[in-house]
Image: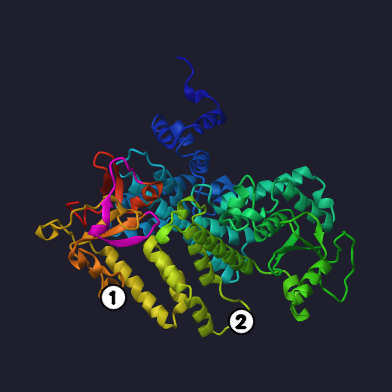
């Protein structure tokens, strides 16, 4: 009898088994007890499967610490099996979300409870085949759940910052990327990895870096950043939205960024190579303040203790150059701009990470406003959101959350009622986006917004609003059949059309046999002046600019068969439809529970 497979050395067998997928590991374990011991009973195999099978983990696992710990400290098999069950449950919940409007918000929030453990399953569903029966809906809601997870992660970072916990500047600003960008590369670990590689590249290029003086280190880092392509941004694209997103700047081939982001990147890299660098919130600009170690000058000379504990420091402007900026030049600018001498220390001192987040919010708001003003189409219809990256609506939504969580001040000069009044001004914008684009953020509203207004009338109203959202979510939509009353409803849910008067593209998502709007809206819109008046059918429609509108039948003009839906409509349609059907030249309804005959 020839030698058996199990006669091979144990180390070799384990090395072979590391190439197996989980199903093969379980199958092989059935062959004999030795193989079982080396496979399903081996923590080496399961740690390997965890490491190679998943790149994203929920923060509560502290997976980096687990990988660094001794092998026997973690039940790797149990961890892998638990993760596989999370995959299955995420898929099951998403199937329900896609299949019915009933309890959709609750199930998306259930998925979000898994945090990072659900992300890889959702990313896979975002890439479902083009010929999938529910392709549009599956991609739309998988992406919605993924964005919901990312938003909660970002808000959690800002909440930590507001509560006084230390938050690295790259993480605090990277929260904007989490809010407004999509894809598997949008992750704090990815952004951190990009910075780690840059820091490693710096130390590899300059092996003597740690032996240099603070001044030399700072200049070397600034020059290295410019050599890597971090050279600010031309005036022509200064206000581009992408320039305010630190993660996107890191991954962009050109690395174009606003001064604030250039400084934040410098500070983040400095921290990784042992250099004390902090942002300086100058007037209309941001500089870097680099500090020498205690009892040392910037040139590395030992300085015995003096009565002053002030650290030796220098200014840099990594946005413009690698050269040192003299404090005298900055003072001259302040004097020329009429800034009182008593305020000079404020503009020449280091600023907080919180203030950098809020300044970024203002920069993003300005960029979004610029885009909207430049690209607004006829009658206010624009598809700028489709070509802008990051998504400008999500970016604006992020700024509102940042202002609510972190604003409006941290110096104690405002009373509680004044703080609430300042925060109150952001609520209409938050609720508008929430209701139109992300009703599944209701749990975030409960957890983070309502506590800000507990003692105010808004708190009670918000609580009632949230409760009504939950109640509506658990109710099944009453069916609206096409009976005798609907004989005047000529167009079906899923019909692609052009507005007869304003020419925008839209798709019908619902209908009423007559105008069901309030009297004030009817009067303001001049409905009674239409030839068909208020008694004609009215249609709920989704427009290619993301808006939801209510349109009279006489203004619905179905497109011809030679006209296909635009990319904008295709990206939005999954909210209400399964797919586009070429044969019927319409979208396949995913609201059959509400409109069973359409």
Q: In the displayed structure, would residue 284 be above or below residue 85?
A: below
Q: Quadrant of residue 525?
A: bottom left
Residue under numbered circle 2:
412
Where in the figure is residue 443, as x and y percent of width and height?
40, 66
Residue 558 belongs to the span the image colors magenta: yes
Where in the figure is residue 597, as x and y percent of width and height?
17, 52
Q: Residues within 10 Å of mark 2 (few under 14, many from 20)?
A: few
Where in the figure is residue 169, as x and y percent of width and height?
64, 61
Q: For the point 31% across and 49% down, which residue is it? A: 95
Q: Can residue 305 be seen from the camera position used here?
A: yes
Residue 343 belongs to the span the image colors magenta: no
Residue farthest top in this picture: 1
Q: For the point 33% across and 56% down, which residue is it? A: 542
Q: In the displayed structure, would residue 468 be above or below residue 456?
A: above
Split into 4 quadrants, where in the image is the N terminus? top left
Q: Nearer the viewer, mark 2 or mark 1?
A: 1
Residue farthest left in this picture: 484
| Disc 1 element | helix
Q: Nearer the viewer, residue 474 or 320?
A: 320
Marked residue nearer the N-terminal end (2 or 1): 2
Residue under numbered circle 1:
520
Q: CA distance from mark 2 to mark 1?
A: 44 Å
Q: Which residues are magenta?
A: 544-565
Q: Nearer the viewer, residue 54 or 250?
A: 250
Q: Residues within 10 Å of mark 1 (few under 14, many from 20)?
A: few
Tag 2 near tag 1, CB within 8 Å: no
């Amino acid at each position: 009898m020839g030698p058996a497979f199990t006669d091979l050395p144990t180390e070799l067998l384990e090395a072979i088994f590391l190439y197996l997928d989980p199903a093969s590991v379980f199958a092989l374990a059935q062959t004999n007890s030795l193989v079982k011991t080396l496979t399903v009973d081996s923590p080496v195999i399961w740690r390997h499967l965890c490491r190679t099978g998943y790149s994203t983990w929920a923060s509560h696992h502290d997976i980096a610490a687990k990988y660094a710990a001794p092998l026997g400290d973690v039940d790797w098999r149990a961890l892998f099996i638990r993760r596989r069950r999370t995959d299955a449950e995420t898929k099951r919940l998403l199937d329900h979300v896609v299949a019915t409007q009933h309890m959709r918000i609750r199930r998306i929030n259930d998925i979000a409870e898994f945090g990072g453990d659900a992300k890889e399953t959702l990313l896979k569903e975002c890439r479902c085949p083009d010929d999938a029966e529910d392709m549009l809906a599956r991609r739309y809601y998988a992406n919605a759940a993924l964005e919901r997870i990312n938003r909660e992660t970002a808000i959690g970072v800002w909440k930590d910052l507001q509560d006084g916990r230390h938050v690295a500047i790259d993480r605090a600003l990277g929260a904007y990327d989490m809010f407004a960008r999509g894809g598997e590369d949008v992750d704090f670990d990815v952004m951190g990895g990009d910075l780690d590689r840059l820091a490693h590249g710096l130390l590899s290029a300059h092996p003597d870096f740690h032996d240099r003086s603070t001044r030399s280190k700072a200049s070397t880092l600034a020059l290295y950043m410019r050599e890597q392509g971090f050279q600010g941004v031309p005036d022509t694209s200064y206000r581009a939205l992408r320039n305010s997103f630190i993660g996107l700047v890191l991954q962009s081939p050109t690395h174009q960024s606003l001064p604030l982001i250039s400084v934040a990147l410098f500070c983040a890299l400095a921290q990784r190579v042992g250099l004390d660098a902090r942002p300086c919130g100058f007037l209309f600009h941001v500089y870097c303040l680099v500090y020498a170690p205690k009892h040392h000058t910037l040139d590395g000379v030992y300085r015995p203790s003096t009565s002053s504990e002030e650290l030796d420091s220098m200014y840099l402007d990594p946005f413009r150059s690698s050269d040192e900026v003299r404090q005298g030049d900055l003072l001259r600018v302040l004097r020329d701009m009429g800034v009182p001498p008593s305020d000079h220390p404020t503009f020449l001192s280091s600023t907080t990470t919180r203030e950098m987040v809020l300044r970024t919010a203002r920069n993003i708001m300005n960029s979004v406003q610029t885009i909207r003003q430049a690209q607004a189409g006829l009658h206010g219809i624009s598809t700028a959101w489709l070509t802008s990256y990051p998504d400008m609506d999500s970016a604006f939504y992020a700024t509102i959350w940042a202002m609510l969580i972190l604003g409006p001040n941290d110096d104690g000069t405002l009373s509680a009622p004044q703080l609430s009044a300042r925060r109150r001004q952001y609520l209409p914008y938050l609720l508008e986006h929430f209701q139109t684009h992300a009703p599944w953020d209701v749990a975030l509203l409960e957890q983070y917004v309502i506590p800000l207004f507990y003692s105010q009338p808004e708190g009670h109203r918000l609580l009632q609003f949230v409760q009504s959202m939950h109640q509506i979510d658990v109710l099944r939509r009453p069916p609206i059949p096409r009976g005798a009353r609907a004989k005047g409803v000529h167009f079906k849910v899923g019909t692609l059309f052009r507005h007869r008067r304003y020419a925008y593209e839209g798709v019908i998502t619902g209908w009423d046999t007559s105008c069901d709007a309030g009297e004030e809206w009817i009067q303001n819109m001049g409905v009674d002046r239409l030839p068909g008046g208020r008694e004609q059918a009215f249609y709920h429609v989704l427009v290619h600019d993301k808006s939801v509108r209510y349109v009279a039948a006489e203004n619905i003009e179905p497109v011809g068969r030679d006209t296909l839906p635009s990319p904008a409509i295709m990206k939005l349609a999954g909210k209400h439809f399964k797919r586009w059907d070429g044969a019927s030249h319409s979208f396949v309804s995913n609201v059959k529970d509400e409109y069973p005959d359409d």
